[in-house]
Every structure is written in structure tokens, then in C-alpha cells.
Image: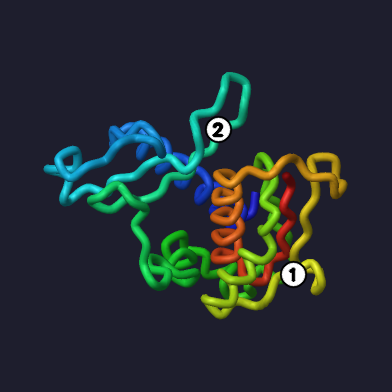
């Protein structure tokens, strides 16, 4: 397995582990959990998170997305994206060989549950913000199919849409010139 593929697999594994770790450390039951100032006392140096998606029924796919919360139990919002940018992600995983070529000629396939009807437009916002080249259906960079390779997608799900957007954004970050195949 080429180094850059192993690194992408490692990135996915780290993301999954972080989501699982958040589940054990926050003590927050879910989006409907009540978070008042007293409940958050003593957590000044810890991030408080809550699930994006409801708990899955037995036999259903589980969403691992979480939202960082403020002291009043509201999603923590900023006026602009913050955190690590694409070059930070590539540097953290030692993806210098990928970043030199940008992954031209490579395709990353992302498989997620449900449908994100705004996947392509959300990806355009991320890529534009970070100065990455456009990745659209029109230019042949982005392709979205269902599990059979067709265009009859599963039902939309807002929680999974956030997960899909995150997956697409991180694929773009580590491989800005790769083509992206989204399988829903």
C-alpha cells in the first residue's frame, strides 16, 4: 500500500478514534441534553461536545459527528473557520509527497451513509476558503453515486450530511488535486 494511502487510512482511523473518545469523556448524552452553567462547572479547560445525530437504532449505521458547545449549551460558533488548515493537516501526517504533486491523477473514494444533497456546494465553500482548486461535477473532479453506482440516492440526513462534509473537506485538505468519488 503506498505511503499516502496508508496516511489517509490513518487519518480516517484517528478521526474515528477521536469521535469515540469524545463519546466517553464528555458525559453529554446527546443534542437534547440539558447543559446549564452549573452542569459545566469545573470544565473550563475541557471541551464540551454533544452528538450531531440521534442515537442509532440497532442495525442502523451510527454517525460519529460531534459539535463543540459553549457554556450555555449552544453550538460554539465563530465568525470564520478556525483550527488547522489543509497545509497543517498535510504537515501533521507527513504528506509532503502528496502535497508536492497535490495528488493529481489520484481518486479518493469516500463511503458514507445517507445522502448529503449539498455535498458539492459545501465542498466548494471549503475549497474556496482555503484557496484550493475547484472540485466540481462539471470539471470532472467530483462525482457522487449511490452504493450501486447510480444517481438514486438514499434519504437525506442532516447529521450524516455534516459527517459527509467533514470527510470531503479532509480529503481535499490532504489531497487538493485528487478527484473525489462520494458513495452514499
Q: Is residue 3 left or right of residue 108?
A: left
The image shows residue 182, relative to residue 177, as above or below, that is above
Residue 58: quadrant of the picture: top right
At 72% across and 52% down in the image, what residue appears?
Answer: 182
What quarter of the picture does the C terminus occupy? top right
At 36% across and 67% down in the image, what residue appears?
Answer: 78
Residue carrying label 2: 62
Q: Is residue 69 left or right of residue 106?
A: left
The picture places residue 84, in percent across and down from the top left corner, at 40, 66
Residue pushed farthest bottom? 131
Q: Are marks 1 and 2 in contact (CB under 8 Å)?
A: no
Residue carrying label 1: 136
Disc 1 packing (10 Å; few <14; some 14–19; many ≥20) = some
The image shows residue 159, relative to residue 122, as above or below, that is above
**Secondary structure at numbered mark 1:** loop
The picture places residue 53, in percent across and down from the top left corner, at 50, 39
- Counting the numbered discs, the total is 2
Separation of marks 1 and 2 at Cα, in angstroms = 28 Å
Choose between 156 and 13: the one closer to the eye: 156
Amino acid at each position: 500500500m503506498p505511503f499516502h494511502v496508508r496516511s489517509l487510512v490513518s487519518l480516517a482511523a484517528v478521526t474515528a478514534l477521536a469521535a469515540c473518545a469524545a463519546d466517553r469523556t464528555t458525559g453529554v448524552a446527546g443534542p437534547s441534553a440539558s447543559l446549564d452553567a452549573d452542569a459545566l462547572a469545573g470544565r473550563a479547560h475541557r471541551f464540551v461536545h454533544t452528538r450531531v445525530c440521534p442515537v442509532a437504532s440497532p442495525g442502523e449505521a451510527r454517525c460519529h459527528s460531534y459539535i463543540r458547545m459553549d457554556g450555555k449549551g449552544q453550538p460554539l460558533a465563530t465568525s470564520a473557520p478556525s483550527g488547522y488548515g489543509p497545509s497543517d493537516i498535510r504537515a501533521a501526517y507527513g504528506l509532503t509527497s502528496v502535497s508536492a504533486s497535490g495528488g493529481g491523477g489520484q481518486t479518493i473514494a469516500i463511503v458514507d451513509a445517507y445522502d448529503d444533497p449539498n455535498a458539492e456546494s459545501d465542498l466548494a465553500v471549503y475549497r474556496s476558503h482555503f484557496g484550493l482548486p475547484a472540485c466540481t461535477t462539471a470539471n470532472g473532479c467530483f462525482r457522487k453515486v449511490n452504493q450501486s453506482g447510480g444517481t438514486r440516492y438514499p434519504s437525506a440526513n442532516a447529521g450524516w450530511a455534516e459527517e459527509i462534509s467533514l470527510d470531503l473537506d479532509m480529503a481535499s485538505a490532504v489531497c487538493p488535486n485528487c478527484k473525489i468519488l462520494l458513495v452514499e
